[in-house]
Image (spheres, rainbow, N blue to C red):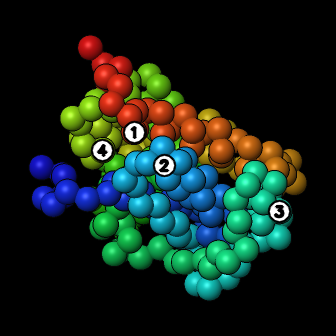
Amino acid sequence: MTDRPAPGPDRVLVLCSANQCRSPLAGAFLQRVVDRRGLAVDVRTAGVHAVAGRSATPGTVAAAQARGVDLRDHESRALDPALLAGADLVLGMERLHVREAVVLDAGVWRRSFTLPDLVRRAEAGGARGPDESLRAWLEFLSAGRDRMALMGASPDDDVRDPTSDRAVDHPGTAAYLDALVERLVDLAWPEGRSAGRG
């Protein structure tokens, strides 16, 4: 059984590369939505190549502020095994981040996805049932996944990084992440609605 033995909040770990842009944005948006809905969810963020203690980038802070989130006090955190072990769900911004998580702890494979991939799978597979644990739902959505599918980059699975990719900007990335997070919460914490699966 993959569920924690003791009840408690669902724990979500959001990953990007430096933990200075995409994961702070997605994590803050996710925490805001679950707090607003009164859901027991604890959101943490980290970077697979992060240097601890760095601020969010200025563009990230501005994009967050424009969407009602304050990241001025954010400090980056490096990914470590303890963060992974405590997470019920690991959300990467790119396939690379999911690969790094699985290399560090192979046991997180069935509960680690890129954010766009998980939303797509959940919309196809159905919302989490009212008595279904988060980990059990993720196991269901993970069925049939091939680890080799994580190789390389993917325009469908990856959230592009506005700090290094001039084809995207911070406000657009923030809007995309905010919308994805809302869709994810509707599916993963559907507030008592019945599951989408028959």
As shown in the figure, which amino acid type bears the numbered disc 2?
Answer: Val
Q: Which of marks 2 and 1 is nearer the N terminus?
A: 2
Instruction: Find the distance from the CA under tag 4 to the CA under tag 1.
Output: 8 Å
Q: Are marks 4 and 1 in contact (CB under 8 Å)?
A: no
Task: Name the residue tied to disc 3.
Answer: 62
Task: Name the residue tied to disc 1.
Answer: 189
For image coordinates 57% across by 53% down, the residue present is 32
Q: Do the residues labelled 3 and 4 touch (CB within 8 Å)?
A: no
For image coordinates 48% across by 33% down, the residue present is 186
Which quarter of the figure has residue 47? Answer: bottom right
Q: Can residue 170 be seen in this view?
A: no
Instruction: Find the distance from the CA under tag 2 to the CA under tag 1.
Output: 8 Å
Query: Furthest-right residue in view?
Result: 166
Instruction: Give neighbour class at mark 4: few <14, some 14-19, many 20+ (Cα, 10 Å).
Output: many
For image coordinates 18% across by 52% down, the residue present is 2
Which quarter of the figure has residue 170? Answer: bottom right
Instruction: Find the distance from the CA under tag 3 to the CA under tag 4.
Output: 33 Å
